[in-house]
Structure formats: structure tokens, C-alpha cells
């Protein structure tokens, strides 16, 4: 069974630009979560999508947004990039009818803002 | 305000000995706790969990203990192996489908 995949692996942008990160969940998983891991910090919850709808979002500004497609893959968009957006962005998926707490993570996208 | 805290950034243990990783939380609404392990260049992988109705859960070499009155949980690894060297994250949930993670503890198991 293929795991959660994320692309790109690395992304370098300059301040003010926009970044788009992509995530493909495990086949059969309907929920996707996005987390930010900045240096020295734990994973900070960003967004939760389920069945194409945004179900919850963390304490991040509106320039962090995303969507979930009919095939359950997801996209995270970060507009007007700031230096402090540099972080590892992790995507996780779950199969909704199973334990919702056991999330399966992808390898992450390393975003660097110069 | 960090609701889940892992106060030890790193821990070094000799192979074969016990590793004890600690985690404290502040939100009394948390009722499910998990440990994840993360190797470099990989996403975190689920290790073990415990619900608030239990005080201990064991899975092979890994045991998680929960002390609700102290709002404290710990992960014991016995015996520790070099392959256990990784970053360990403690996470908590209030069944709202959102996990709150600690900052992580780097475990180094020396052979």
C-alpha cells in the first residue's frame, strides 16, 4: 500500500511570492490534515479537510489556505510569503471510519523563504 | 501557549538500557494521547497510544504510562536499540480530530 505522498520535496521562494504544496493521501483515506513544523517547534495544526470540505483550521492567518479535490488529494497555498513561513509542511491522512487519531504522515515539503 | 510540552530536547541512552521520554499537558479536555517517531527526511509514524480511561498501554518494547492527575505521560522503551534513535513527538487529542503536538525529543541510542 502506497503511503502519503507530498510534492515538491523542497521549495524555495522569495518573500511576497505564493507557494503551492500538494498532498496525496493513502488510497481509501478521505481526510487530510496539514501541519507546519518550524525549527525547534512541534507540529502546528494548520488545516483539516474531509470529503472536500474544510472542517477545522488552526491559529494561522488567512493567507494560509487550501482545498481538497474529489480524489481526496489536497493542496496547501501560502500567499504573500514571509520569512517565518520557512518550515517543514507535513500532510497526514486518515480513513474516517477508523480511529481518527492515528494519522499517517507524508515525508513533508521543506519550504524556504528568502 | 504550548498545551503539550516535551521539556527535554534530547536524550542519550546506552543500547540495552531503558529510554524514558516525558510529556506534560495542560488541557484537561485531552483524553487521547499518542506517540509518534520521526526519522530524518521522513514523516512521523504512529508508535503507540493511550486513552484517558487507562493508565498504561504496552506494545512490545514500548509502554506508555498516563498520570491524569499530574497531566503527565511517559514513553518507556526497553531495551533500547540503535534503530530507536529518532525524534519522538508526544501528541494529544480531545476527539476533535485535531492533534496537538509537543516540540519533540531527540533520542540517541549509543551502541
Image (cartoon, coloured by chain):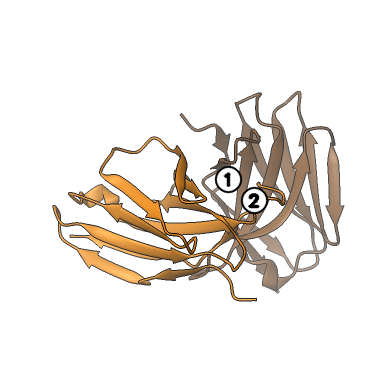
Element type at mark 1: loop
Q: Is residue A87 left or right of residue A95?
A: left
The quadrant of the picture occupied by the N terminus of chain A is bottom right
Q: Is residue B92 left or right of residue A48?
A: right
Q: Say which residue appears at 56% left-offset and 67% top-offset.
A: B39
Q: Is residue A61 visible?
A: yes
Residue that carries the numbered disc 2 in the rendered image = A96
Task: Report in which chain the residue with disc 1 lies.
Answer: B
Identified at 78% across, 37% down, the residue is B66
Chain depicted in orange: A
Where, quadrant-wise, is the C terminus of chain A in this rendering? bottom left
Instruction: Please tell me which residue is depicted at 51% across the width and 65% down the height of the picture.
Output: A106
- Whether A81 is drawn above or below B52: the answer is below
* SS state under label 2: loop
Q: Is A47 located above or below residue A23 in the figure?
A: above
Q: Nearer the viewer, residue A63 or B13?
A: A63
Res A61 quadrant in image: top left
Marked residue chain, label 2: A
Q: Residues at marks 1 and 2, common chain?
A: no
Q: Residues within 10 Å of mark 1 (few under 14, many from 20)?
A: some
Point out residue A105 in the picture as x, y percentages from the top left corner: 55, 61
Which picture quadrant has residue B91? Answer: top right
Q: Which chain is brown?
A: B
Q: Is residue A45 visible?
A: no
Residue at 71% across, 49% down: A99
Q: Position of residue A69 (x, y in %)?
A: 42, 59
Other-residue count near label 2 (Cα within 10 Å), few / some / many at <14 / 14–19 / ≥20: some
Label of residue B8 in the image: 1
- Distance, label 1 to label 2, CA atoms, is 34 Å
Amino acid at each position: 500500500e502506497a503511503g502519503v505522498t507530498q510534492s515538491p520535496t523542497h521549495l524555495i521562494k522569495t518573500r511576497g511570492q505564493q507557494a503551492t504544496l500538494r498532498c496525496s493521501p493513502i488510497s481509501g483515506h478521505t481526510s487530510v490534515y496539514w501541519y507546519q513544523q518550524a525549527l525547534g517547534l512541534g507540529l502546528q495544526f494548520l488545516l483539516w479537510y474531509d470529503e472536500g470540505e474544510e472542517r477545522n483550521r488552526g491559529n494561522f492567518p488567512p493567507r494560509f489556505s487550501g482545498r481538497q479535490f474529489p480524489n481526496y488529494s489536497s493542496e496547501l497555498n501560502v500567499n504573500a510569503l514571509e520569512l517565518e513561513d520557512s518550515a517543514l509542511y507535513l500532510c497526514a491522512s486518515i480513513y474516517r471510519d477508523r480511529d481518527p487519531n492515528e494519522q499517517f504522515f507524508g515525508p513533508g515539503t521543506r519550504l524556504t523563504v528568502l | 501557549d504550548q498545551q503539550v510540552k516535551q521539556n527535554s530536547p534530547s536524550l542519550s541512552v546506552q543500547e540495552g538500557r531503558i529510554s524514558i521520554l516525558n510529556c506534560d499537558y495542560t488541557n484537561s479536555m485531552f483524553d487521547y494521547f499518542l506517540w509518534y517517531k520521526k526519522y530524518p527526511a521522513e514523516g512521523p509514524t504512529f508508535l503507540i497510544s493511550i486513552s484517558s480511561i487507562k493508565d498504561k498501554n504496552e506494545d512490545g518494547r514500548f509502554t506508555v504510562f498516563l498520570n491524569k492527575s499530574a497531566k503527565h505521560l511517559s514513553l518507556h522503551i526497553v531495551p533500547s536499540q540503535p534503530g530507536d534513535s529518532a525524534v519522538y513527538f508526544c501528541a494529544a487529542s480531545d476527539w476533535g480530530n485535531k492533534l496537538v503536538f509537543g516540540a519533540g525529543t531527540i533520542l540517541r541510542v549509543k551502541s
